[in-house]
Amino acid sequence: MHMTIKISGVEDIQRELGDIVTKQKIDEALEKSAILVKAEAQRYCPVRTNYLHNSIVEIKIDDYTWRVMASADYADYIEYGTFRIPAGTPENPLIYTSSAGKYPSYRPYLRSALYDCTERIQNIFDKVLNEGQQSV
């Protein structure tokens, strides 16, 4: 189970803005964004043994691409549900409950984390752009 954060068109932006936005600044903003999404996903995932929680990591794939993923074998089932339990949406992740009633049968922790972090990720990139403009 993984979610990839990729920025495209960076070369065009750098051409237009010159030295205001450097590759290093963009990479730092992407890393902060991936760490933020990872922390939120860990907060949202159900915890019984901490295995799923601890399996969530952020990985740099290449320039301008970071991946937040969970390596637990059952990560997909928690995120998307099963054939008996249809998946919900990030806005309504807790539609069904388990037979115990205590834990949700599934919880889209990665999608919910990205959904909830969208504005904060935009703020991270706005801050990078503003710092670049002030230094010119």
Image: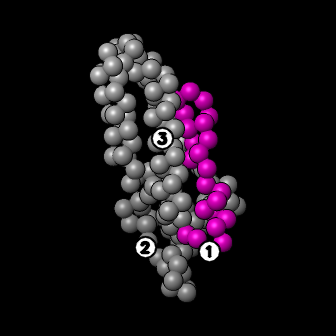
Residue under label 1? 48
Q: In 3D space, how far apart are the residues under numbered discs 1 and 2 (Cα atoms)?
A: 20 Å
Residue most extreme to the bottom: 100
Out of 105 and 15, give the one closest to the viewer: 15
Which quadrant holds residue 128? top left
Which quadrant holds residue 105? bottom right
Residue under label 3? 32
Q: Are marks 1 and 2 in contact (CB under 8 Å)?
A: no
Where residue 1 appears, as percent x and y from the top left, is 61, 53
Q: Is residue 125 positioned above or below 112 on the image?
A: above
Residue type, numbered disc 1? Arg
Please say whether residue 80 is visible from this viewpoint.
no
Please say whether residue 130 is visible from this viewpoint.
yes
Where residue 81 appears, as percent x and y from the top left, is 55, 67
Query: Which residue occupies 52% across, 46% down?
Result: 35
Q: How is the image coloured?
A: one colour
* Circle 2: element type: loop
Magenta stretch bounds: 46-68
Query: Which residue occupies 51% across, 54% down?
Result: 39
Residue type, numbered disc 3? Lys
Residue under label 2? 95
Query: Which residue occupies 56% across, 27% down?
Result: 63
Q: Is residue 61 magenta?
A: yes
